[in-house]
Amino acid sequence: MKKLGINVDHVATIRNARGGKHPDPYLAAIQAINYGADSITIHLREDRRHINDHDVKKICKDKKIIVNLEMAANYEMLKIALKNKPNFVCIVPEKRKEVTTEGGLNLKKNLTKLKKIISKLNKANIRTSLFINPNINDVKLSKILNAKCVEIHTGKLSDLIKIKKEFKKEFNKIAKCSIYAKKIGLQVHAGHGLDYKSTKLLNTIKSIKEFNIGHFIIGDSIFYGLKNVIQKFKKILKN
Ligand code: PXP
């Protein structure tokens, strides 16, 4: 069965709106694991707009939680990752003014730095994935860079589905990259903007092993509860 990673950043977004301690993303992480999530994703942004350093420490310290730390490719973040030892790291591009991670990494432009960072993470036994756009060249580069996984950015596909536009071309790109990545020995993940409909569709791509979903799950939990929403996604991934 495919794995479900749940991103709890937006629990921290709600907490930070009032500056207090509630709701606690750590508690959301514990509950998500109890309800069937396979891992928890947290994105420590340079501007700390949702998850902060204390959250990273607290969530990584609890060994019941399998943690996927999303971070930008810089040495400050590398130091934090090596100190807190999450199970996984996903390297993502980061722009201060973006609302969310708008696209995949520019691997070509950052080869040297990425190579160094991935090598340090590999040595620390932290499984590293690279968040990429669905294109074959980036899959090839990810392998050359020695990453263990690629996470394919599904934002464009998700948007096309939401606005009921033609999405076949984008879907085929994702399918082609996933099949190729698996063939050359990379584990394939998918994430960004996913809801029930887009997850159901992407679940038909057998090479995808893991889905990482955040905003929709936290948002829908307001109406239906975290347990029900997670169970609904798990049911989709069973097929
Ligand atoms: N995967 C990666 C690499 C991301 O950067 C994000 C957003 O932080 C997600 C998955 C989750 O995206 P969403 O919140 O839109 O489900």
Image (spheres, helix red, strand yellow):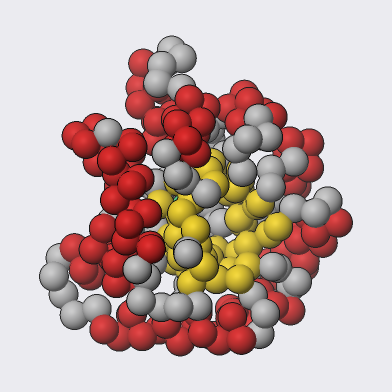
Going 36% across and 85% down the picture, which residue do you hit?
A: 172
For residue 26, say whether it is visible: yes
Residue 177 is left or right of residue 160, and the answer is right
Query: Which residue is the extreme one toward the right?
Result: 123
Counting from the top left corner in percent of width and height, residue 60 is at 66, 34
Counting from the top left corner in percent of width and height, residue 141 is at 66, 79
Counting from the top left corner in percent of width and height, residue 140 is at 64, 83
Q: How many marks?
A: 0
Residue 196 is left or right of residue 88, and the answer is left
Residue 177 is left or right of residue 155, and the answer is right
| Viewer-proximal residue among 205 and 194 | 205
Instruction: Examine the rendered structure and indicate whether residue 25 appears above or below residue 105.
Output: above
Counting from the top left corner in percent of width and height, residue 10 is at 39, 36
| Viewer-proximal residue among 95 and 239 | 239
Going 52% across and 68% down the picture, which residue do you hit?
A: 209
Query: Which residue is the extreme one toward the left?
Result: 164
| Viewer-proximal residue among 63 and 131 | 63
Instruction: Examine the rendered structure and indicate whether residue 92 appears above or below residue 75.
Output: below
In which quadrant of the rendered view does residue 169 lie? bottom left
Could you tell me which quadrant the C terminus lies in?
A: bottom left
For residue 137, say whether it is visible: no
Going 33% across and 80% down the picture, which residue do you hit?
A: 170
Instruction: Examine the rendered structure and indicate whether residue 144 appears above or below residue 231.
Output: below
| Viewer-proximal residue among 139 and 1 | 1
Going 68% across and 34% down the picture, which residue do you hit?
A: 63
